[in-house]
Image (cartoon, rainbow, N blue to C red):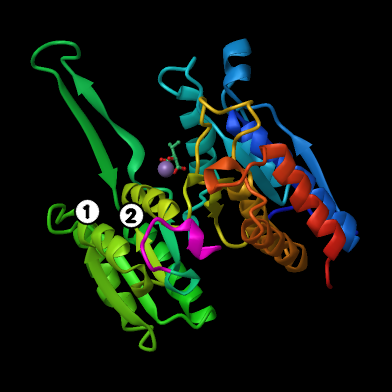
């Protein structure tokens, strides 16, 4: 499953839209509005097709990720716009693991790019920090580590119960995510690179990270390479986030750090992400989950999803549409046209309308 083949002759790109559950559905609807406004303004075309893979579908007919779904997506689409999964009726969240982790693994989306960029100084809970201090990228390894679901339970339900959860670290896997981080830094002329792990406690698995890192860093002499154990990195991110530009982390550590990063820039509602394998179809989703408590109430912040769609547009070669969408989001935050989590008084739909209208008014410069 290499090259995406969704692209049409006329340059139209095809997007698979998977809203999922709860707030995922709410925010994705607004992102679709904004995408439609951007392409209407630029004259380029996106063809969107919705898929109902969700808790509802799972509870209705037992389907999580349908048989052959990954191949179908690769064959027919250029990118995937994803909402969120998770539903209190599905206690073990089986559908979420099958669909989201299934797609990450089956499509080999080894880069989970989670930018932490402060849009407005008022949004950070850190004292005296401004936009200049908070702008870093977390590259989370996305196909190995503790997420591989290898393990088992012995003597289940007895006092002697044993649970084993293995983690996988491969030379190839570690090298490709570190290289991705370095190449990104080089391309963007960023000089501060930090690799994080917990090799002091996990000498085998994360020892491999250390060894691959030691080899790779010599190939990027213009970049200042630094290592921090993940606990120290968490502390430093709060004390002085301006030290960081590019962070590369193993899967679970990157998961945790990206929630910390999201809070530093204004909360879970604003953080975007892209699950990427360069040159192949990618999956773009807000970092937040399905937020059952606020789902369906016109309360969820659509910005994380809207910014994820901007990452998607860049990836599929629509950078001008991405730029105006980012500009719209910035303007909305600056002008207080936001949902209540950011101190505004608008609903999910009103923010979506405002952003779509901004994009329509400003147009797309190509
Ligand atoms: C995320 C989420 C997922 C993860 C869950 C839903 C499995 O927390 O995308 O960060 O841990 O990767
Ligand atoms: Mn997470």
- The residue pinned by badge 2 equals 250
Other residues around mark 1 within 10 Å, as few (<14) / some (14–19) / many (≥20)? some
Which region is colored magenta? 116-129
Quadrant of ligand 2: it is top left
Q: 105 or 340: nearer the eye?
A: 340
Magenta span includes 155:
no
- The residue pinned by badge 1 equals 205
Other residues around mark 2 within 10 Å, as few (<14) / some (14–19) / many (≥20)? many
Residue 267 in picture, x, y percent from top left: 47, 48
Q: Does the Cβ of the disc 2 residue fall within 8 Å of ligand 1?
A: no
Quarter of the image for residue 72 reads: top right
Q: Residue at x 31, y 34 (%)?
A: 150
Task: For the residues labelled 1 and 2, say whether their Cβ atoms are less than 8 Å apart.
Answer: yes
Q: Residue at x 69, y 54 (%)?
A: 4
In terms of sequence position, does the residue under pointer 1 or pointer 2 come before the other?
1
Residue 344 in picture, x, y percent from top left: 61, 46
Q: On the picture, is 30 further left or further right than 45?
A: left
Secondary structure type for disc 1: helix
């Amino acid at each position: 499953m290499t090259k995406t083949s969704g692209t049409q002759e006329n340059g139209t790109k095809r997007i698979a839209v998977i809203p999922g559950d709860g707030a995922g559905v709410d925010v994705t609807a607004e992102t679709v509005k904004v995408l439609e406004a951007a392409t209407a303004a630029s004259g380029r075309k996106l063809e969107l097709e919705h898929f109902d893979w969700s808790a509802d579908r799972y509870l209705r007919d037992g389907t999580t990720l349908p048989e052959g779904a990954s191949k179908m997506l690769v064959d027919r689409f250029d990118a995937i716009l994803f909402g969120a999964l998770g539903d209190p009726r599905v206690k073990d969240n089986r559908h979420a693991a099958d669909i989201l982790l299934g797609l990450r693994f089956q499509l080999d989306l080894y880069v989970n790019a989670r930018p932490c960029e402060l849009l407005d100084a008022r949004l950070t809970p850190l004292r005296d920090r401004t936009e200049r201090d908070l702008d870093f990228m977390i590259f989370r390894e996305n196909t190995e580590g503790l997420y591989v679901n290898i393990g088992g339970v012995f003597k289940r339900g007895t006092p002697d119960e044993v649970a084993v959860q293995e983690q996988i670290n491969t030379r190839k896997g570690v090298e490709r995510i570190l290289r991705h981080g370095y190449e990104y830094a080089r391309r963007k002329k960023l000089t501060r690179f930090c690799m994080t792990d917990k090799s002091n406690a996990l000498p085998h698995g994360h020892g491999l990270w250390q060894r691959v890192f030691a080899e790779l860093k010599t190939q990027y002499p213009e970049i200042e390479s630094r290592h921090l154990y993940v606990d120290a990195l968490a502390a430093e991110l709060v004390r002085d986030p301006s030290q960081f530009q590019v962070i590369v982390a193993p899967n679970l550590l990157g998961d945790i750090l990206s929630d910390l990063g999201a809070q530093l820039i204004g909360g879970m509602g604003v953080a975007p992400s892209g699950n990427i394998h360069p040159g192949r179809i990618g999956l773009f989703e807000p970092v937040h989950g399905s937020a059952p408590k606020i789902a369906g109430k016109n309360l969820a912040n659509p910005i994380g999803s809207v910014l994820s769609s901007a990452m998607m547009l860049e990836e599929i070669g629509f950078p001008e549409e991405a730029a105006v969408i980012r500009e719209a989001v910035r303007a909305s935050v600056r002008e207080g046209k936001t949902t209540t989590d950011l101190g505004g008084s608008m609903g999910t739909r009103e923010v979506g309308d405002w952003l779509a209208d901004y994009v329509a008014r400003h147009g797309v410069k190509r």
